[in-house]
Amino acid sequence: MKGTRISKKGLTALILMAVLFFSLAGFGAFASPPREGSPVPMVPGNFTSIAGAAKPGVVNISTVKTTNGIGPVYRHFFENPFKGKDPFRDFFDKLPRGEQEPGFKERSLGSGFIIDREGYIVTNNHVIDRAEEIRVKLSDGREFKASVVGRDPNTDLALIRIEGASDLTPLPLGNSDRIDVGTWVVAIGSPFGLEQTVTAGIVSAKGRVIGAGPYDDFIQTDASINPGNSGGPLLNLAGEVVGINTAIIAGGQGIGFAIPVNLAGDVISQLKAHGTVTRGWLGVAIQDLTPELAKYYGMEDRKGVLVTEVFPGEPADKGGLKAWDVVLSVDGKDVATSRELSRTVASISAGKEVTVQVLRDGKPLSRTVTIAKRPAGETVLAGGDREEEHGPLGLTVGEVTPEIARSLGIDENTKGLVILSVNPGSPADRAGFQRGDLLLEINRKPLDSMDTLRAELSRIEKGKPAQILVKRPKAGMIVIPLEK
């Protein structure tokens, strides 16, 4: 049988076609969607539907406030544990700060999002803090004057309201506990005043403690966040709010932080109902389990929190807790660190009876404790990274932890206390203290523990200021007088 002749050109064409066919087949094998059950998620084709549905619920917030006339010479005093500018101050201020006369009107920009059709809007406390005028601009261009419903400096959350607005589009709230590291998220806001800017990225980490306040539990994301995004929503792929964009690391790229919506939910509800936030109180001093303590207590997994002191007459004392108990869970929620225990107790309503699971002398026990309202100015659940609020002074301070030491750029063995927050208008604020200040001495006595600070403050006579030696990032050593 006579075979078909193929010319040289034809043979070359067939070879090229075969190579192309197998190349495409191979590419298709790699490019095809993963089979059902595959752990590798597909990259979203686009974020058009999410952005389109959410943008009407995102607002631009502009404020006017009177400054104290601080010029650029003192601008380096506004530093923080991130070695750069204050992440909150730097987050929404877009206007340059020149030499300012006393009474200078400072204008700032931020973001927020609508949570219901009654005109309630969530934003950050630092966006509206000390604002004399607040204006909200909707995505359709309408503008309204806003009033403050309530604010919570400890979590940097605020609730404002506009009246007389119709056809509002509230954003649905999601569940921040269900988002995993690597999950796609979308941020919408007004970076540098560029309204309705949409950026996308992933969740880089969860549970970040950045020294911003006593209830740090931030979501870290690499979705582009810039000054002006503050208070805007962080959305999941279902278009639900899972976080409130709050802070950035100055000079950092792809490093932004958002308050988890689950942490914000109770705060927002309380602000809406009462204008203020109350938190649960247990009445103990605590610390994280070190490897040595965990081994001593036979807890190799180190999941638990050591009680170092039970305050007489407080809920824990009445409920039968004792010093050296290891708390395992509260109200059915496991607690592995002092931060988790602090947040868990703070979220429980005063008057509620809860079961506290502890380990005592190697034996598991259950105790029923009635949670009380945390009194202002009293010791917060303190721990290895112990914190304490001094209500009349307006300071929240904490012992230096390795993480805070690294962010301050100091040796991890440094002794001292770091300021985590300063209440606006408080004696500490008026004296000039800033978040991130390292307190080294008080009246020439080294501040090596919270007990020392507490004892020395109790000795201060009214009208006689204490001299506090402070190390301030990029400013060196300064002495600040603090008066009761």
Image (cartoon, rainbow, N blue to C red):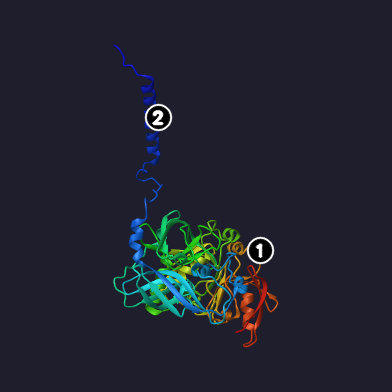
Counting the numbered discs, the total is 2
Q: Residue 93, position in %: x, y?
A: 50, 70
Dot label at residue 413: 1
Callout 2 amino acid? Val
In this rendering, the answer to whether 193 lies above or below 425 is above
Q: Nearer the viewer, residue 135 or 410?
A: 135
Judged from this view, the residue extending furthest toward the right is 444
| 8 over 205 or under it: above or below | above
Side of 421 relative to 24 (left or right): right
Tell me the kind of residue under disc 1: Asn
Seen from the viewer's position, the closer of residues 279 and 261 is 261
User: Residue at 43% across / 58% down in the picture?
Assistant: 199
Q: Is mark 2 on a helix, strand or loop?
A: helix
Depth-wise, is mark 2 or mark 1 nearer the camera? 2
SS class of the residue under badge 1? loop
Label 2 to label 1, Cα distance in Å? 64 Å
Question: In the rendered view of the protein, which quadrant contains the N terminus?
Answer: top left
7 to 460, vertically: above or below: above
Callout 2–callout 1 Cβ contact below 8 Å: no
Residues packed near mark 1 inside 10 Å, few (<14), some (14 to 19) or many (20 plus): few
Residue 19 image label: 2
- On-image quarter of the C terminus: bottom right
Give the image location of residue 96, x and y in percent.
54, 70
**Mark 2 vs 1, N-terminal side:** 2
At x 29%, y 71%, the residue is: 167
Badge 2: residue crowd in 10 Å (few <14, some 14–19, many ≥20): few
Question: x, y percentage for residue 420?
Answer: 56, 71
Quick one: which residue is furthest to the top in this view? 1
Please tell me which residue lies in front, 76 or 375: 76
Percent from the top left, x then y, of residue 342? 49, 69
* Residue 53 visible (yes or no): yes
